[in-house]
């Protein structure tokens, strides 16, 4: 009986390293993450490219209930009859959700920009307009985050840029916005965005373009041979 008990203890101890590795590999509940919401695809055919959009950005001025929003944003496409909403709550912040992102497919911002502000229960926040590529599709992203001025500048915004597939460089000329309005809204200019062809479309059209180029080359070569057949050199 004692031998059996000792065997069980030894077996349990031998599993300890594996259990520790599993715990280290498990994601932490406090790890930073972002809520991502896709907007409808812009109607480029009806409204052209580029086209303007309408946004709302809001941040809490005082702490609220766990389910209350700490930040939220909306993005409206033409004709502005509906909008896409994304936000992060006080409860979400305690679980590591530090921002919300709206991304419009097949679009890119013409003038990516970053805005930050001080105030509110988190100490401050930021809003970034940047372009990304995920799964072969290009997006125009609008990311609102908690980004207290006490931390290194734009840490959370840059983290979101990297995590959400940002392309190119993070906007290098951030603008500090005025303090939030008395109702929590933020007065931020909106860069318009333009259409980006989907890579899948480019892949489908590439063989056709190459075929036309080859056909044109062969036809041009044939014409040169025909026109040169009557020329003689002395």
Image (spheres, helix red, strand yellow):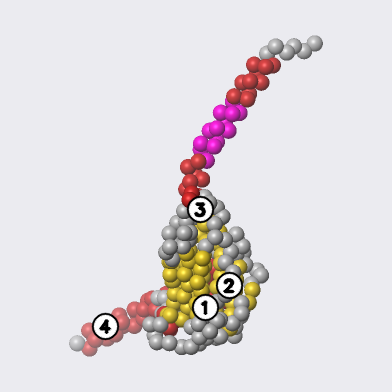
- Inter-mark Cα distance, 3 to 2: 23 Å
Q: Secondary structure at mark 2?
A: loop
Q: Secondary structure at mark 4?
A: helix
Crowd tier of the residue under label 4, counting other residues whose Cα lies within 10 Å: few below 14, some 14–19, many 20 or above: few
Mark carried by residue 174: none
Q: Quadrant of the C terminus?
A: top right
Q: Earlier in the sequence, mark 3 or mark 2?
A: 3
| Helix, strand or loop: magenta stretch | helix
Q: Which residue is mark 4?
A: 8
In the rendering, at what x and y percent does residue 206 appear? 52, 40
In the rendering, at what x and y percent does residue 12 appear? 31, 82
Is the Cβ of the residue at disc 2 closer than 8 Å to that at disc 1?
Answer: no
In the rendering, at what x and y percent does residue 114 appear? 60, 71
Q: Which residue is mark 2?
A: 188
Identity of the residue drawn at 55% across and 79% down: 125
Question: Closer to the observer: label 4 or label 2?
Answer: 2
Residue 150 sits in quarter: bottom right
Q: Earlier in the sequence, mark 1 or mark 4?
A: 4
Identity of the residue drawn at 51% across and 81% down: 184
The magenta segment is 206-218
Q: Earlier in the sequence, mark 4 or mark 2?
A: 4
- Inter-mark Cα distance, 1 to 3: 28 Å
Q: Secondary structure at mark 3?
A: helix
Is the Cβ of the residue at disc 4 closer than 8 Å to that at disc 3?
Answer: no
Q: Which residue is mark 3?
A: 47
Q: Which residue is mark 1?
A: 185
């Amino acid at each position: 009986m004692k031998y059996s008990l000792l065997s069980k203890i030894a077996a349990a101890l031998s599993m300890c390293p594996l259990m520790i590795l599993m715990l280290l590999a498990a994601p932490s509940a406090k790890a930073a993450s972002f809520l991502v919401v896709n907007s409808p695809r812009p109607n480029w055919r009806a409204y052209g490219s580029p086209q303007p959009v309408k946004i709302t950005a809001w941040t809490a001025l005082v702490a609220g209930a766990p389910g209350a929003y700490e930040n939220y944003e909306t993005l409206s496409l033409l004709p502005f009859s509906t909008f896409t909403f994304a936000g992060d709550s006080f409860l979400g912040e305690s679980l590591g959700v530090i921002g919300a992102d709206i991304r419009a497919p097949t679009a890119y911002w013409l003038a990516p920009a970053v805005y930050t502000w001080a105030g509110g229960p988190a100490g401050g926040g930021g809003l970034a307009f940047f372009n990304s590529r995920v799964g072969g599709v290009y997006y125009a992203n609008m990311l609102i985050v908690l980004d207290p001025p006490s931390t290194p500048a734009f840490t959370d915004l840059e983290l979101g840029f990297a995590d959400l597939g940002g392309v190119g460089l993070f906007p290098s000329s951030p603008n500090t916005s005025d303090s939030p309005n008395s109702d929590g809204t933020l007065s931020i200019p909106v860069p318009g965005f333009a259409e980006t062809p989907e890579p899948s479309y480019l892949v489908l059209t590439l063989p056709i373009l190459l075929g036309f180029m080859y056909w044109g080359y062969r036809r041009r070569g044939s014409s040169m041979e025909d026109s040169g057949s009557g020329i003689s050199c002395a």
